[in-house]
Image: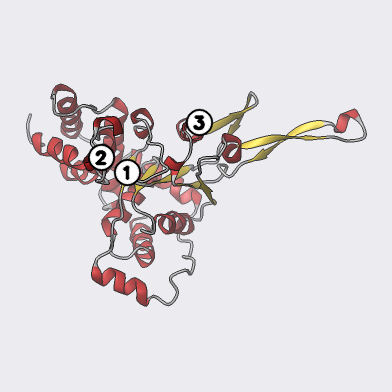
Amino acid sequence: MRQDIIEIQNALSEKIIGKAHQLKLAITCLLANGHLLIEDLPGMGKTTLSHALSQVFGLQYSRIQFTSDLLPSDMLGVNIFHSGETDTNKQFSFRHGPIFNQVVLADELNRASPKAQSALLEAMEERQVSVDGVTHALPSPFFVIATQNPSYQSGTYPLPESQLDRFFMRISLGYPAWEAEKAMLLQQDGNAPLNQILNEQDLTNMQRQVSAVHTSDAIIHYILRLVSESRESNDYPNPLSPRASRALLQGAKAWAYVSGKDYVTPEDVQAVFIAITAHRLSLSSHQLSHSQQSGLFDGDKLSQKLLDSVDPLAA
């Protein structure tokens, strides 16, 4: 499987040039069975990344454009009444919404109303949706990639901290370097689809193998010291939750697996730490001044400060 991971990274790098670290984080998030939040300016390749991931893994893909008038039923689906000549033909049937796919791009999530946001996040957490009292299971694997405009832009509804906490990782692609953007401009077939490398069964097997990656007590204690420091210090107004500590453990396992190892080291925890914790530690919009909100990742400095404050070799 290691060679397959390298092949996937190389294929994705043909689409998203010069962003190897972010691509590795996205693959890590998928193998850890989490959901990914991408916060960035428009036109940075967020949609391209989500579509490319679905292609290389051979997964069913759908895109939902979140707008202020989006209703939960537009996303989840709706019961439709069929009338016939006889009573036996008069019945309701459920028409599945676009969320019933294996990779779902929730584009510009924070432009939708809190009601629509909550409907998506419930599906992410429960891996099922309920419509008119009937529960419908979502496909497996189920991977949501949500994109979010910076909160200082007009027409956005900031995600509450409790909902941000449900995203496994948050990343930003950012502007490409000069040479990377030049290579992108010179591409002749930039819109060509990628070839399928793996299938959903391969992905499921990889996710099982990630869970089996060895983690020593020293690594677990390192993670516990990190989350405890966030709770005990007054420097972090939004301490890390137990969900965050579980994400750190699973993320470190997945990063180690993608790196070709069957055990976790402190460097694996550090590699995923900011992506997993920055959006959890970041201050809410009402805690920030407008000038502070203008930064895409106000939680990055808090995450780095927390990471630097804990010695991985301490007993």
* Residue designated by label 1: 152
Query: Few, some or many C-alpha atoms within 10 Å of disc 3 (few <14, some 14-19, many ≥20)?
Result: few
What amino acid type should be assigned to the residue bearing mark 1?
Answer: Tyr
* Residue designated by label 2: 290
Residue depicted at 87% across the width and 30% down the height: 88
Return the mark for residue 90. none
Give the alpha-carbon distance from disc 3 to disc 2, as whole Å. Answer: 25 Å
Q: Nearer the N terminus, badge 1 or badge 2?
A: 1
What amino acid type should be assigned to the residue bearing mark 3?
Answer: Lys
State whether residue 46 is above or below residue 282: below
Left or right: 256 with respect to 153? left
Residue depicted at 36% across the width and 47% down the height: 38
Residue depicted at 27% across the width and 53% down the height: 260
Q: The C terminus is located in which quarter?
A: top left
Give the alpha-carbon distance from disc 1 to disc 3, as whole Å. Answer: 21 Å
* Residue designated by label 3: 115
Disc tally is 3
Cβ–Cβ below 8 Å for labels 1 and 2? yes
Where in the figure is residue 34, as x and y percent of width and height?
A: 39, 40
